[in-house]
Image (tube, coloured by chain):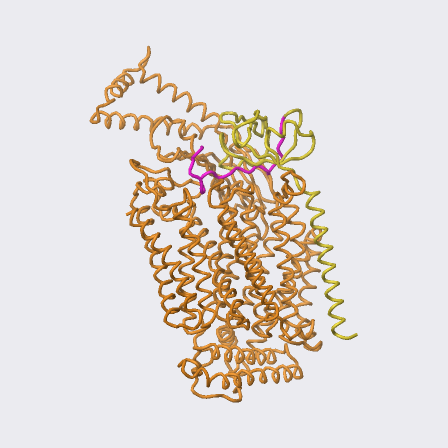
Amino acid sequence: MASLGSALLALAFVTALAAAALALWGRNGDRHRVDLSRRTVYAFCGLLTACVVIIEIAFASDDFGFKIVQEHSSIETPNFYKLAAMWSSQEGSLLLWAWVLSIAASLSLWATRNKLREIVPYATAVMMGVAAFFTGLMLFAPDVQPFDTVSGATDGVGLNPLLQHPSMMIHPPMLYSGYVAFTVPFAFAIGALITRRLDAEWIRATRRFALIAWTFLGFGLLLGARWSYTELGWGGYWAWDPVENAALMPWLLGTAFLHSIMVQEKRGMLKVWNACLIVGTFSMALLGTFLVRSGVLQSIHAFGDNTVGPYILGLIGVVVIGSALLIVSRLDDLRSPKRIDSLVSREAVFLVNNLLLVGLTAVIFWGTFFPLISELFTGDKASLAAPWFDRYTTPLAILLVLFTGIGPLLAWRRVSWDSARRVFRVPLVVAAVTLVALVVFTDASHKPWALALFAFAAFALAGLAQEFWTGAAARRKLTGESTPTALVGLVSRNRRRYGGYIVHAGIAVLLIGIAASSSFQTNRDVNLKPGESATIDGRTITYVKPTVAVDNEKFTFGSLLKVEEDGKLVGYLRPSQRFFRPTGQETGLISSFFAGEATSEVGLRAGPGADLWIAERPNITAVQRRVRDADQGFTACIKGGPGTPPQCKALGALMRGSVGNPGLEEQALKQVNRLQGLAATNVAKTYLTDTAPATFKVIVNPLVTWMWIGGLIALAGALIAIWPTRGRRRGALVRTEADARKEAKYREIRDAELDHAVGKLSDEDFAAVDAELREEALEILDREEGEKVPAGGNGNGSNGNGVHPREPEKVEQG
Amino acid sequence: MDPQRKRKIRLVVALSVAVLLAVALIYTSFSASTEAKEPSEIASAAPGSSYEMTGKVVPHSIKHVGNGIAFRVVDRDGGGEALPVTYQGTVPDPFRGGREIVLTGSVENGTFVGEPETLITKCPSKFTTKSDG
């Protein structure tokens, strides 16, 4: 199987190169070659899928002839984690990268099979170039070949117990999918630059991929934060660890990109900016991939120095320098004749939001790479800790949440002061009331940053609620539906817009959770003996009794804790620490239980008001001493020294006799195991009567639950925005670029009508904007007429409607 | 004022603000950073100033002292003289002899005193082929 896998991988590498070559060969409009290259990409995807399946089968069937299986799984590893063990390895994670890329490339080429004729060949070449790079690494770089074999192994090393967490199944693939999917918009951007087709077509074709990448990456970050939150010593949900930062940076730039491409789509502006942003986003994604593999920065995600780092760095260099040269050479084509009409318009707010996001990324980049920067200038490696990051990111995040609220309230192009006053009134009042209430009723005024964030988040949430309300009201007036039906209809008819608003609401809620839990957290270490209690932040915690569990794999020492608030019982928590034997070792002296990994199981009581988080460090000094005594006793016993009981002598004789005698060996092993198991259980149970104090780390985290809820709201919003809308207007077929251009313009007209209906555009402004848009729509139709004649032989140049709406009809509202 | 001029002024103002912020960022990062050193360099470092120490825990050197722990570290490559360390606060689960750690603290009387909650233990399993537990 392993040699089949190697062969398939080698074939995949050749296939990727062939697809790229075919695409470039057909770049001048040879459809057959381009079609063939697309099908070659599908084949590439199929080959890598086969590789992944072979590896996963090897994991599932404990085929320890595979080096990757031997080093990252074991017979004892639970089945669920056997499947996830692939990406705990360097080579497996590279395979995952390439595989996800092959899927993303296939999907994007399928989606554009009738579009973007000029750009697609180059985009194919870029994607397959990157794919060939990663596939090539797995073939030619030392130590990262997924199909390497070992001989003679009967069991594996196993998956680190720390990684045996349900998040391991989804967190890494999510992050990878996020990183990888950004390749698609990047590749199309490069294609657009090369062919000088710099209108919004490539954006329209790949916007959804950018959004999917952003969603995957964001969800991966959220899962990682949640996982880290439930582990001891991982620094809570966010620790400004280099690897965390490396995943956050492409997400932030991706957020900026998703906003600024709307400006290019609607106004044809910010083309240079967008090209730079997507190059930056993709480079950051590569940088994230590089960082976890290079060992250049100190991180809790310590992946060790290894061999592929320099290659990825080389790729980043090629991407950055090549793209920069390309952008500079196309500057003349990228200039837009248009200017932002007014500083009070949505595009102006997008520009500010972009600057904030890029600023935030720059700060994080500087902080993350500061050790290298300082070494360069001062000769000493020096690093920056969380407080430095907080100092800069906090004000930027606060401003961002404010603009999260302002953006949706403003219409495109222009906003008159009258309508601005109208839409800002309610959110401003809500923000002011929130501010006053927080100052009067809580102690939030001690933390001005948090206070500002709460007020701005209230502003944003009120503004968004108002958007939904006025939208639903306008629709109700038009259709006579009930409010809930109107709301559902409104969202499903304008998924991009309202999905985006839901994301904004989720981010505002998430930031409330972060601000509250980081500013008002109580964190204390207490030593308690059984029966004792401590009061922390109004909660009384009583150490009721110690607990013990023993199995072949591990000792678990824990405690039963009673939690009371205001004298009332609110629940019990059971934090514990588990001590694993080294993986693959089921027998041996009892002390082997303390030779493997240890993991803490946190006791967590989540609530809408605050989370109570308790980790325990049990005092096992006495238990360990007894383990040592028992082990010594056992050794002495089977040696048969003077005074040992007769059973010991018998076992000792059996063990000595079993050497070189397989029949007896099994019997002896059984005996030893039984005795060892009994002894281990008995020794461990002595912990139950131990009165030594255990150390508890108690954290009260206010409102942190809202961080997860906000994250999930944002995810839901993103999914709504991604969900394909079939037939944007009833009966409209969108096959060609011209169709897409037209549809986009119709949608803009509809958006403006909606903005007018909800009061964001005054009658005057609407009249002006509407006239502008209709003129632009007519221009598109005229251009299409002109294009039609030479494009006649093409067969796909005609618009799919069958009729030519000379005058864009009044589009159905909402 | 003609719009061309207005735009130019706007650009200059925005650029100056950006430059000022960047300078502030650079300045504070140099003053707020902690120097990273390996145990062998720390032995001869100035007492009192804070360092981020990266080293390897000497196996079997970990002892519980009061509410904290005491242990010794050597350079990451295993060389250099062992440096005694004391630390109070959360000890991450993977912490044990032979593991690489990162700890911020300062030297007092020849002992490296770690600041609470700054101990990071590297998770050894990911992407490494050697198991060194």
The x and y percentages for residue A643 are 33, 11
Q: Does A795 sit above or below residue A279?
A: below
Q: Which residues are magenta?
A: B111-133
Residue A658 relative to residue B123: left or right: left
Q: Position of residue B3 (x, y in %)?
A: 74, 74
Q: Nearer the viewer, residue A643 or B76?
A: B76
Q: Nearer the viewer, residue A283 or A35?
A: A35
**Chain A's colour?**
orange
Residue A788 screen position, x and y as percent: 46, 84
Of all residues shown, which one is farthest toward the top? A642
Left or right relative to A502: residue A446: right
- Name the outermost residue toward the left: A663
Q: Is residue A68 above or below residue A647?
A: below
- Reply above or below: B49 against A731: above
The residue at the point 47 percent across, 77 percent down is A728
* Magenta: main secondary structure: loop
Q: Residue A726 location in percent, x, y?
A: 43, 75
Question: Extreme right residue here?
Answer: B1
B124 drawn magenta: yes
User: In this picture, is A620 found above or below A340?
Assistant: above
**Residue placed at 29% from the left, 35% from the top?**
A152
What colour do you see for chain B? yellow
Q: Is residue A732 magenta?
A: no
